[in-house]
Image: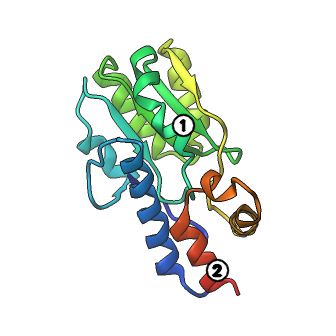
Amino acid sequence: MVRRRCFTPASGAEQLEQALIEDCREVLHAAGLPLGSQQPLQAADLRGSVQPNEAAVVVFTDVPGLPLPAMESLPQILREADVVLGPCADGGIYLLAWSASVDRALTEGMCNALASTEPLAALTDLLTDAEAEVELLPSWFRLSNERDFNVIDCVARLSVLSEDGEDDFSAERLRQWFEKFTE
């Protein structure tokens, strides 16, 4: 898990960050994926914590309600692809995973790309040059600005009104945070 600064409103910023981290841990656990570090890392520290020729899953703390179906499918997808990428519409990513077949140079290159200001573009160039077998997950969103915050607030509130909404929006702590701090 990589700590990435997210947009926070004036009140409840610390609680929002903790809600995002706890929801991320819950989704990783529910999907049966190992949680390496108990504390989120900074992107710059990621390269020193991953081992070459070892599979890894990297998620970010500014991503609300990771899509559980995508997370649950990761082990199967990684049997067939070198890299799995979850893009965000703003040019960021919400997930990067790679199989044990990925070599040291590509692993280091991906870690460096994650620390860049445009990680999706940097990863696209790197993976294209490496001719890696890539599986793309559905686009998701992250909490990078006030507009994102408002969209996520609406999704959280509307999911309660939907018949299957509570299952579709799995970030229960985030929903509780919104209920508490946005009223």
Q: Residue furthest front?
A: 163
The structure residue drawn at horizontal position 35% and vertical position 41%, both measured from the top left corner, is 32
Q: Is residue 109 left or right of residue 90?
A: left
Instruction: Give how far across and how far down residue 103 sits, in percent.
Output: 31, 19
Q: Is residue 113 left or right of residue 138?
A: left
Q: Decide which of 45, 133 is in the foreground and name it.
A: 133
Query: SS class of the residue under badge 2?
Result: helix
The structure residue drawn at horizontal position 34% and vertical position 59%, both measured from the top left corner, is 40
| Mark 2 surroundings within 10 Å by alpha-carbon count, few (fewer than 14), some (14 through 19), many (20 or more) | few
The structure residue drawn at horizontal position 26% and vertical position 53%, both measured from the top left corner, is 37
* Residue 8 visible at all: no
* Residue 176 visible at all: yes
Instruction: Give how far across and how far down residue 121 sits, in percent.
Output: 61, 34
Which residue in the structure is indicated by mark 1? 70
Instruction: Give how far across and how far down residue 136 sits, in percent.
Output: 59, 27
Q: Which amino acid does label 2 sit on?
A: Glu
Location of residue 171 with respect to 105 vertically, above or below: below
Location of residue 17 with respect to 130 vertically, above or below: below
Q: What residue type is labelled 1?
A: Ala
Is there CB contact under 8 Å for labels 1 and 2? no
Q: Name the mark on residue 39.
A: none
Location of residue 54 with respect to 116 vertically, above or below: above
Of mark 1 and mark 2, the one earlier in the sequence is: 1
Assign the C terminus to one quadrant of the image: bottom right
Q: Decide which of 58, 116 is in the foreground and name it.
A: 58
Which residue in the structure is indicated by mark 2? 179
